[in-house]
């Protein structure tokens, strides 16, 4: 199956500083479009938080307008810029999420068993703070939830990045309680990937054999985190992250940027395309002598 991850669109209304930098609703629509134009439409989109910027009803109304462009079902989770109740109501009304979402003031944790892979949403928000938090009760919930299907490959998605990315002003040295999380993952080797957002930049690390990664924002990038760089944000496009589940592992990739780009069709360049195609579909070998170096 094919999974797309879209993160941190920070949808906001006109008149804000962010919107003066970038048209965030349009960037989100463009990200949906780049998913819709893939040769294979993603089976699901993981939407990893900071869906709006100031958590106002007007922003969620604007978010709802963008969701009609999504080509796939969406599994959302709130970030530190979201209001979980408004987020839940927006998705319930939109019909874009295939499962009932948490409502009310409790943690926004849920598991989805409708796909070939299992998806577990872990709420890393800490009410009143921008920084993230994994509490002992959250780690117990995760442990119990993962224990229910130990043989099903699982992706855990959360907003905050549970490891230091090197950005002193953005990741605050990771998430408080991350050690609890690491203990849980060590007990559940069926977790094949952990994906986050929040830092507005592609990063990844390893916890043993488990890869954890962060997606860029569809709205704007954060200035390079490693080192003592200034706290700047950059109006720069980033591709949607893709995860292809092969049946025994995850291959990470990315969609094309939603901007016009020149293409060259290899079928027009190769004097014996049929033979090349036949050999490539048979997994090689592809002779240099026959098809050029
Ligand atoms: Fe964000
Ligand atoms: Fe965030």
Image (cartoon, rainbow, N blue to C red):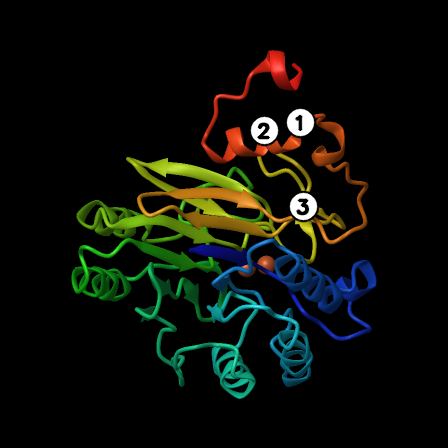
Residue 230 appears left or right of 104: right
**Marking on residue 214:** none
Give the x, y percent position of residue 264: 77, 36
Residue 57: name its quadrant: bottom right
Whether residue 230 is situated above or below residue 221 in the rendered picture: above
For the N terminus, give its image quadrant. Answer: bottom left
Q: How far is the residue under mark 1 from the one under mark 2?
A: 6 Å
What whole-number distance in Å separates the C-alpha atoms at marks 1 and 3?
A: 53 Å
In terms of sequence position, does the residue under pointer 1 or pointer 3 come before the other? 3
User: Decide: marks 1, 2 in contact (CB < 8 A)?
Assistant: yes
Quadrant housing the C terminus: top right
Mark pair 2, 3: CA separation = 54 Å
Q: Nearer the viewer, residue 110 or 133?
A: 110
Q: Is residue 104 above or below residue 229?
A: below
Residue at the (24%, 50%) spot, across then down: 190
Give the residue number, with chain letter if any, for mark 1: 272
Q: Which tag, 2 or 3, sits closer to the chain's start? A: 3
Q: Say which residue label 2 marks.
A: 275
- Whether residue 227 is visible, yes or no, is no
Residue 231 as seen in the image, left or right of residue 210: right
Element under label 3? loop
Q: Tell me the number on the disc at residue 231.
A: 3
């Amino acid at each position: 199956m094919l999974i797309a991850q879209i993160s941190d669109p920070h949808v906001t209304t006109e008149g804000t500083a962010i919107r003066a930098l970038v048209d965030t609703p349009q960037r989100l629509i463009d990200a949906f479009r780049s998913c819709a134009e893939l040769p294979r439409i993603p089976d699901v989109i993981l939407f990893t938080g900071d869906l709006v910027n100031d958590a106002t009803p007007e922003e969620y109304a604007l978010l709802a307008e963008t969701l009609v462009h999504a080509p796939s079902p969406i599994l959302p989770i709130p970030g530190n810029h979201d209001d979980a109740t408004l987020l839940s109501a927006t998705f319930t009304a939109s019909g874009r999420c295939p499962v009932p979402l948490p409502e009310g003031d409790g943690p926004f944790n849920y598991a989805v068993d409708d796909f070939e892979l299992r998806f577990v949403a872990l709420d890393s928000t800490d009410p009143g703070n921008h920084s993230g938090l994994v509490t002992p009760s959250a780690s117990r919930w995760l442990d119990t939830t993962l224990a229910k299907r130990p043989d099903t490959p699982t992706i855990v998605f959360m907003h905050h990045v549970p490891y230091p990315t090197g950005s002193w002003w953005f990741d605050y040295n990771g998430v408080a309680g991350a050690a609890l999380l690491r203990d849980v993952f060590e007990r559940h080797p069926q977790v094949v990937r952990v994906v986050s957002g929040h830092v507005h930049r592609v990063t990844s690390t390893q916890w043993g054999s488990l890869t954890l990664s962060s997606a860029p924002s569809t709205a704007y990038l954060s200035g390079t985190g490693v080192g003592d760089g200034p706290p700047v944000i950059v109006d720069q496009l980033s591709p949607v992250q893709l995860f292809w589940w092969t049946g025994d592992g995850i291959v990470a990739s990315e969609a094309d940027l939603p901007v016009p780009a020149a293409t060259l069709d290899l079928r027009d360049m190769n004097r014996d395309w049929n033979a090349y195609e036949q050999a490539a579909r048979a997994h090689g070998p592809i002779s240099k002598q026959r098809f050029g170096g």
